[in-house]
Amino acid sequence: MNNKQKITENINEDWSDSKSISDICVKILDFISRKPLVQLEHMTQGSLKSAIRNQYSDADFLSAVQYLAGSKVSLLEIKFEFIEDDFIFQIDDSVIKEAIRDGYLAHPSSGELVDDFEEKVFLYFRPGHLAKQISKKS
């Protein structure tokens, strides 16, 4: 049995009570396994929704992505970026946690407080540990 089959079995077992979440997880797994790693370095929610043909509820999609990014599976890594005009800055997870807790974010370049940081911070995904094992190598 290969890694992908084992992961699929685990997904189906873990989500035996929710066929839609199980289906989303398996479709994202299939998507990742067919792509070269270089094409997976910046996956957005939109690209993952396209991979599953956007036919599921947002709640199920988010549950599936949360599961796939969790420590048990590690198929996806959650990352954040600050986008303003033509500038894109990678933001560390701990900085985002602090910004949510404190209600403000210091601009990554100027250090000035960004009032509407929630509108300028975007979530994306990178391949997690398992994705690196099952994706195409070239």
Image (cartoon, rainbow, N blue to C red):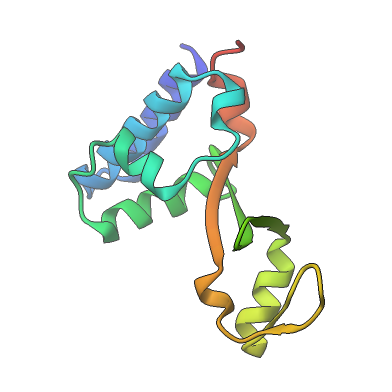
Q: In this view, does 77 lie above or below 88?
A: above
**How far across and down, in percent of the image, does residue 130 sit?**
58, 30
59 vs 118, left or right, is left
Left or right, 6 with reference to 83: left
x 41%, y 19%: residue = 5
Q: Residue at x 54, y 20 (%)?
A: 134
Q: Which of 113 and 67 is in front in this view?
A: 113
Answer with the quarter of the image where residue 113 lies: bottom right
Q: Quadrant of the C terminus?
A: top right
Residue 112, x across and y down, in percent:
77, 83
Q: Which residue is drawn at 48% across and 20% down?
A: 35
Q: In which quarter of the image is residue 19?
A: top left
- Whole-percent x, y for residue 115 in the image: 60, 86
Q: Camera-side residue: 9 or 32? A: 32
From this view, report whether residue 105 is shown above or below residue 66.
below
Residue under the point 38% across and 40% down: 48
